[in-house]
Amino acid sequence: VSCSSSNQMLTCRFLLEGDECMMRVSGYVLCLPQFVASPLCCPSRASILTGKYPHNHHVINNTLEGNCSSTAWQKTQEPKTFPALLQAYAGYQTFFAGKYLNQYGNPDAGGVEHVPLGWDYWVGLERNSRYYNYTLSVNGKPKKHGGNYSEDYLTDVLTNMSLDFLQYKSNYRPFFMMVSTPAPHAPWTPAPQYQDRFQDLKAPRDPNFNVHGKDKHWLIRQAKTPMTNSSIELLDEAYRKRWRTLLSVDDLVEKVVKRLEVRGELDNTYIIFTSDNGYHTGQFSLPLDKRQLYESDIRVPLLIRGPNIKPNQTTGLAVQNVDLGPTILDMAGYNVSKTAMDGMSFLSVLEGSVNSTMWRTDFLVEYEGEGSNVSDPACPLLGPGVSVCFPDCVCEDSFNNTYACVRTVAPSANLQYCEFDDNEVFVEVYNITVDPYQLINLAKTIDQEVLEKMNHRLMMLQSCSGQSCRTPGVYDTRYTFDPHLMFSNRSHRRNRLRRA
């Protein structure tokens, strides 16, 4: 994350590499470490909207079959999203523009005529990320866009629609606006004026860049190390393109903030700047994608500007994207305890009225892997069950890349404990304090008592719902340690707790 400002004008340029926020901002801005509940677009976006973990909103991947914008999602979850509550019970006028859920607009789920509950003004992108040649649902009516920059470049279109909303909305009702740019998502198409920027930029060469993950899950171990020159060139060029697309996001942020300032609304408006998942570029020799349990994939930036936030702050209290909905509802004065959300409001953290002893110390990250039932032509020797494979036979996902992690962030511990749903019940454990790049898996050397406590907490989080997801760092001693209990049955792995 890099930020700059002039006269309290916030502009942000970010890439989701799991780095800590670097604050170079004047004005009332707070930077927090944030983690996602699942490192994939649709499950993560569903967690933002519902305030729930994937095991409670049941969106497991980016497909319609995985409940991404399915009719089941529309019936069971959309009425309970925080925008629906803002609109129905807090009197807010609501505006959405951009990418919603990856399968939004699918004809088998109502097409673009479906406008999700909770939105007074709806501008939804049909399907997944595009910059040109796309269709928008404008309050349920399709509007096609072509390839002309001045009329069709999506980031700019979203900017202009957002400015129009701010200009013409009612001045007598509070408002909530959610602008969801595809940038910096593939295909990484920059605006013409930015296409030659950052010519010498390369992906960060951190200690885990182009390193073999010898003690990690088999999917990581299969990565070719060292990476081929073509893979490195690919990821460096992708890195440059992503930065270029974000220059237009910089423009969007600046124009929105200026419009709020001109209207006299900046000082009583919260601005939240974040994303749905991280991204790796060469970590452990995986060229580029997300879906993994490492910090590069599960950490995202979170910057917030607004009332009662002191200037230029950072905090070590970790929050999660399931906390965004409860926090926004809390800002609006809605009683979050009335909801079934798993997350908790961090408004008190923003206002500086909470300390580490009062805050949740650990949380859940869960992901269900995807693969193909036939061998990938790029990687025939790996057989069926893998997906997202590169030409030099490095696959980014597989059916048994299914895992759950408990991530602990506390003054006394900064740990990650993960278990896989595979034949090995493979375990990865990292002490992030001394090993921030997760180079050393401690699963075979860590004290058994610590393993048992982390396993207990993971089992509790995987079966949690609502308030039980928010209990700060409580380990239940009634349960005995048996890692094979975790994933004995993939479809029902949430409730496998065995009493001592």
Image (cartoon, rainbow, N blue to C red):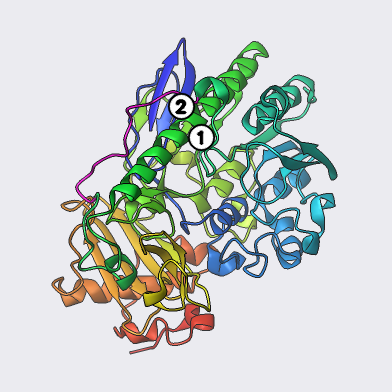
- In-image side of 403 versus 439 (left or right): right
User: Is the residue 265 above or below the residue 213 in the image?
Assistant: above
Residue 197 in magenta stretch: yes
Disc 1 packing (10 Å; few <14; some 14–19; many ≥20): some
- In-image side of 385 versus 294 (left or right): right
Find the distance from the CA under tag 1 to the CA under tag 2.
Answer: 9 Å
Q: Name which residue lies at 29% across and 48% down.
A: 229
Disc 2 packing (10 Å; few <14; some 14–19; many ≥20): many
Chief secondary structure of the magenta portion: loop
Quarter of the image where one finds residue 446: bottom left
Residue 215 in magenta stretch: no
Label number found at residue 273: 1
Q: Name which residue lies at 62% across and 31% down.
A: 155
- Along the line of sight, the residue nearer the viewer: 395 or 265: 395
Q: Secondary structure at mark 1?
A: strand
- The kind of residue tagged 2 is Cys
- Do callouts 1 and 2 mark residues in contact (Cβ within 8 Å)? yes
Q: Secondary structure at mark 2?
A: strand
Q: Position of residue 436 (x, y in %)?
A: 22, 50
- What stretch of residues is rendered in magenta? 195-208
- In-image side of 364 versus 492 (left or right): left
Which residue does the numbered mark 2 point to in the structure image? 12
